[in-house]
Each structure stands twice: as C-alpha cells, then as structure tokens.
Amino acid sequence: MLKVVTKLFHLVQPDLAYFGQKDAQQLAIIESLVRDFDFPLEIRRIATVREQDGLAKSSRNVYLSETERVEAPKLYQALQRGVTAARDGENPIPEMTRFIQSETSGKIDYIELLSYPDLTEAPNGQAILALAVQFPKARLIDNIIFNLKEN
C-alpha cells in the first residue's frame, strides 16, 4: 500500500490528500510517510461516515444477519464508553470487552488504546481507541481518534 501511495504522490504531486479515518492505522502510516519523507503535501483526515445508529458504513455490513445488524452499533457505543474511561484515567479495555461480550454475539479480535499517529503504547495526548470484532460472515473494524486531555 505504501509503495502505491508513494508512486501516486510522486506522479500527481498533490498539495492536499484526503484519507478516511475508517482505517485509522493505515491513515497513521500514510501520515508518517508524508512526514518522514518530507512530501510537500497536507493530509486531511475525513471522519468515518456512520449510519444513523452509529455503525460505521462499510460494504461488509451487508453480510451481517438481521440480529447482528442490530448488535453492530454497540461497537461504536463501546468506543464512546472507552473514550470516557480513558479520559477519566482508567484502562478502557476491560469494560469495553465486557460490554461487547454482553451486548453482541461477535468475537473480539482486538481492542487497543494507542498514541496517535505513532501507534505506540502509553498515550498521553492524541490517542486512538480501535477495535475489530468478528461476526460469522463479517469482521467489523472501528475507531475513535481523540485527545486524552479533553472532557
């Protein structure tokens, strides 16, 4: 992916490039590429587009059963709860795990709280809370990028 993006930036030489936050880990890598290799362009983050109930829009959502589709918005709710806990100085992962396990039939692949955009442990400023949950026919990912110091 970085090879393709690098070639694109060299060929097009844009001043601005827009990338969605849906896959924030990929966005972080692109932001690091631009910074580390001094590309003369600005990356603009585009917020994740969501359904009215909070579920991140994705082509994968069509693979959810009716019941799973009702459960899936709980992932965003878990992230929101996690942000509140993290800002209160708590480790959000145990509570998020309990919430997802009690409110959905999905199996958690990961829940991570990292600094953003460098994706290292022990964030103290800008952070990302990200998760992936596997349902039988769809693996859903979601995240929230936020500042730990704000309330």
Image (cartoon, rainbow, N blue to C red):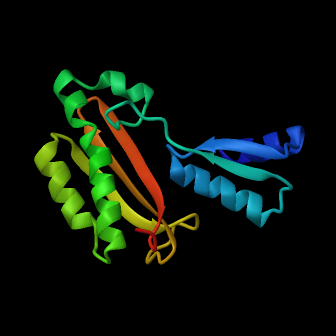
Residue 88 falls left or right of residue 22: left
Image quarter hosting the N terminus: top right
Q: Residue at x 31, y 34 (%)?
A: 53
In front of the other: 3 or 43: 43
Which residue sits at x=23%, y=58%? Answer: 96
Q: Is residue 92 left or right of residue 105?
A: right
Left or right for 5, reference 110? right
Give the image quarter of residue 135.
top left
Q: How many marks?
A: 0
State the image coordinates of residue 102 (x, y, percent, origin top left): 11, 49
The residue lying furthest to the left in this view is 102
Answer above or below: position of 29 versus 85: above
Which image quadrant is residue 54 in?
Answer: top left
Residue at coordinates 34% horizontally, 48% vertically from top-left? 132
Which residue sits at x=36%, y=71%?
Answer: 87
Horizontal and vertical percent position of residue 78:
27, 52
Q: Quadrant of residue 69?
A: top left
64 to 41, vertically: above or below? above
Q: Quadrant of the C terminus?
A: bottom left
In the displayed structure, 50 sits above or below 35; it is: above
Closer to us: 92 or 30: 92
Q: Is residue 57 above or below residue 93?
A: above
- Counting from the top left corner in percent of width and height, residue 26 is at 57, 50
Q: Residue 50 in the image: x percent, y percent?
A: 42, 35
